[in-house]
Amino acid sequence: MSALILALVAGAAVGLALGALGGGGSVLAVPALIYLLGLTPAAATTASLIIVTATSLTALCAHARTGNVRWRAGALFAAAGLLPAAAAGAVATRLPQPVLTAAFAAVAALAAVRMLRPGRTGSGRPGGGRTAASRPVQAAGTGAGLGALTGLLGVGGGFLAVPALVTVLAFEMQAAVGTSLLVISANSLASLVTRGATTAGIDWALIAPFAGAAILGAWDGKRLAAKVTGTLLQRTFAVVLLAVAAFMLVDTFT
């Protein structure tokens, strides 16, 4: 199978996950870029940030049209992660490749476990939930952690942002998914600023189709989320994610 076809298929899967779940797509993007397209872990995390930024902004527009984005709370939540994202992005370019791969696999496994665990629900009211200002310490701490994770590993952090918005700010699930895309977009852009030099080696002939397929997949994912229960989507994705994490860990230490 040609590299272009692999890029298109992987991109569609990433976009589908991001559009349906509000996160998780980048956790598939990095291993796909490494094992299917042959990028180094450092290049893969940078390329993933490009793909995640473009896809998240697209998915954000779709959710904004349906009123599922809490702009003020999301902006405050994201602001706490901008500096950590930029700092971690600079550090990531200096870490050994096996360390990046092992750390990414561990985060992927954590994401899968969180998705398999039953989560709390929010208030269920449109516009419901507390604001970031009502719990500033928790919101700032969580936002900073998500930003650092984005910068270091090239993941958007939506798989952690969604449950954080539900538990810390008591958002209903749809609002958490939509608002997480705002957080992902901001953190990814901040991290890319510090990785400008590493984009020189990116193969745009593969990354551009990958991103394009992901953008189209995000729209399909938004429609899929309206037809399939969130629990089924999360459990299916979590099983795939556990398999990917296990493969990456075995490959790193053998």
Image (spheres, rainbow, N blue to C red):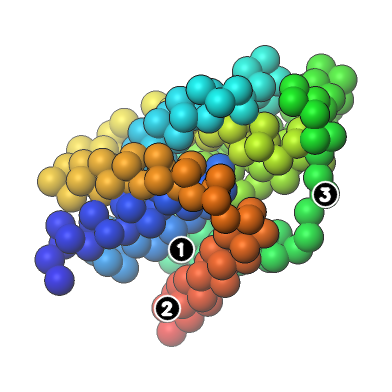
At 45% from the left and 34% from the top, the residue drawn is 59
214 left or right of 165? left
* Badge 1 vs badge 2, beta-carbon distance below 8 Å: yes
Question: Can you tell which of label 2 and label 3 is closer to the viewer?
Answer: 3
Identity, as a three-letter code, of the amino acid under mark 1 = Thr
| Disc 2 packing (10 Å; few <14; some 14–19; many ≥20) | few
Which of 66/199 is in front? 66
Q: Position of residue 79 (x, y in %)?
A: 62, 21
Q: Which mark is residue 165?
A: none
* Marked residue nearer the N-terminal end (2 or 3): 3
Which of 14/199 is in front? 14
Residue 247 seen by the camera: yes
Residue at mark 3: 120
Is 246 above or below relative to 61? Answer: below
7 left or right of 238? left
Q: Looking at the image, which residue sits at the far bottom?
A: 254
Q: Position of residue 100 (x, y in %)?
A: 47, 58
Q: Which mark is residue 251?
A: 2
Residue at mark 1: 101
Identity, as a three-letter code, of the amino acid under mark 2 = Asp
Identity, as a three-letter code, of the amino acid under mark 3 = Arg
At 46% from the left and 77% from the top, the residue drawn is 247
Q: Secondary structure at mark 3?
A: loop
